Image (cartoon, rainbow, N blue to C red):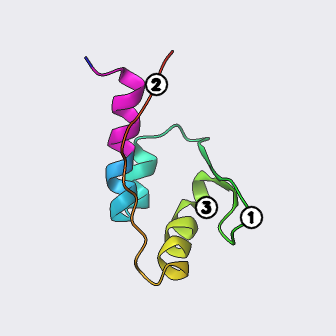
Amino acid sequence: MKHPNAAALEAIYKPFIAGDAAAVLALCEPNVTFQIMGRSPLAGRYEANDLEKLLMNLREFSGGTYRLETHDVMASD
């Protein structure tokens, strides 16, 4: 049986991959934050109202080739 947190994350990834910010946010708490680690131009903390900008930047900086591929999701309480 899949852990509920893993199932929730997998559900969020589907619209994220499709670039559907509204659908992602509908599955998240209103105060959600997204964080990209590192030193790339995309690195930083994004609040819920910044998600559309993040998705647009992912497409722009990758020349439209950005792909998110999930291999494994680990979750616990």
**Mark 3 highlights which residue?**
50
Residue 7, located in which quarter of the rendered image? Answer: top left
> Which residue type does callout 1 highlight?
Arg
Residue 67's x, y, as percent?
A: 39, 65
Q: Dot 3, how many residues are within 10 Å of its Cα: few (below 14), some (14-19), or many (20+)?
A: few
Residue 66's x, y, as percent?
A: 43, 71
Element class at badge 2:
loop
Identity of the residue drawn at 52% across and 81% down: 60
- Mark toward the start of the polypeptide (2 vs 3): 3
Q: Which residues are magenta?
A: 2-12
Residue 72 in the image: above or below residue 59: above
**Mark 2 highlights which residue?**
75
In whole angstroms, how far apart are the C-alphas of marks 2 and 3?
Answer: 26 Å
> Which residue type does callout 3 highlight?
Asp
Magenta stretch holds residue 8 = yes
Identity of the residue drawn at 31% across and 51% down: 14
Marks 2,3: beta carbons within 8 A: no
Q: Which mark is residue 13?
A: none
**Mark 1 highlights which residue?**
39
- Mark toward the start of the polypeptide (3 vs 1): 1
> Which residue type does callout 2 highlight?
Ala
Element class at badge 3:
helix
Left or right: 56 as drawn, with respect to 31: left
Q: Main secondary structure of the magenta part?
A: helix
Residue 40 in the image: above or below residue 73: below
Left or right: 35 as drawn, with respect to 76: right
Image quadrant where one finds the N terminus: top left
Identity of the residue drawn at 46% across and 84% down: 63
Residue that extends furthest to the right in the rendered view of this protein: 39
Left or right: 10 as drawn, with respect to 35: left
